[in-house]
Amino acid sequence: MSQPTTRNEGQHHPIRLYLVVWVWLFILSACSYLVDFFHVAGYLRWSLILIFMALKAGLIVAVFMHMAWERLALAYAILVPPLALLVFVGIMVFESNYTLFTRLAFFVAGS
Amino acid sequence: MNEVAPHTLNPKIGRAPGWQGIVADWSSDQRAFKNVSWGKAMMWIFLLSDTFIFGTFLISYMTVRMSTTVPWPNPSEVFALEIAGHHLPLILIAIMTFVLISSSGTMAMAVNCGYRRDRKKTAILMLLTAVLGAAFVGMQAFEWSKLIAEGVRPWGNPWGAEQFGSSFFMITGFHGTHVTIGVIFLIIIARKVWRGDFDDERRGFFTSRRGHYEIVEITGLYWHFVDLVWVFIFALFYLW
């Protein structure tokens, strides 16, 4: 069981680890850029963009922000609430689709 | 110097594995996050609140974009540049992304050097981070002035849906403000590190009471968060 040593001197990791993550963030960003550069479209574009985004975010939070080594009670307290945002996203997708539908029905068709 | 708060001497508060540990921590009658300093816990809670603010911005942007009947401007072309006769779509945003990621890399290394009490390296790496952050803000200022010159306003733009302008200025403006504050924060802490405030346990603003280098990590948390938000803005605003 890995245990952060003492409160005063936390987070000792080899510099190499940060360099590896840094390189990966570069690669993933380059991949995101290439998705746009080569005009990838449709669901493939969306999946690639979201996968690269999630991987980058995960690397930053886990390694750079040391979440991987934090106390679990803290990690869950921080990571669980943002999941509520996904529910919010879902609600607003319904809402905006409905708004679009009414606009098309009353403004575009009626004009 | 080596004074340790009494609770860290208590072997009982070591981390229990898995859910048991979480339940034990949360049901404690002392502090929920044992061994996590107040400074770090409070920065995390601040960042959590910021997550919700940026989250609502991005969600409202998504909502207006999905509900408008007017075509949305193509960000790939809006943020294209002509460099040496080549038309490069989205190139400015790509450069900004690489600059910000590099600043995150230097910051992570600064935190590492801080914990090894390498004063000079820590300060230099933090200043390098600040320089990269300032470069990012500079490029954003260039981007803003270019778009404003082309007629983009919070209430309209030459290429289509009016909501593009308001979303753009709101989201990138709020992020740029965060970067700017981060640069100032970095410079303040780098100066303290350079002067040796954390070695001679000097008291003062942001130095806390005892001299240890945790504030470097806390500054780093803020800085990485700024980079983290950019990852989402890059994907959802510029690549959509």
Image (spheres, coloured by chain):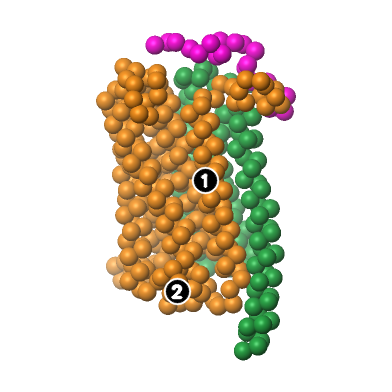
Q: In this view, does B193 lie to the left or right of A15?
A: left
User: Residue B182 sits in which quadrant?
Assistant: top left
Image position, residue B203 (x, y; %): 34, 21
Image position, residue A100 (x, y; %): 65, 74
Identify which residue is drawn at 62% across, 89% down. A111
- Give the letter of the chain under mark 1: B
- Residue B77 shows in this picture: no
Q: Mark 1 points at which residue?
A: B50
Residue A73 falls inside the magenta stretch: no
The amino acid sitting under disc 1 is Asp
Q: In which quarter of the image is the C terminus of chain B?
A: bottom right
Image position, residue B60 (x, y; %): 57, 61
Chain A, which colour? green
Identify which residue is drawn at 43% across, 36% down. B220
Q: Is residue B170 above or below residue A70?
A: below
Q: Name the residue under label 2.
A: B156
Q: Give the range drawn in magenta.
A: B1-22
Separation of marks 2 and 1 at Cα, in angstroms: 28 Å
Residue B8 falls inside the magenta stretch: yes
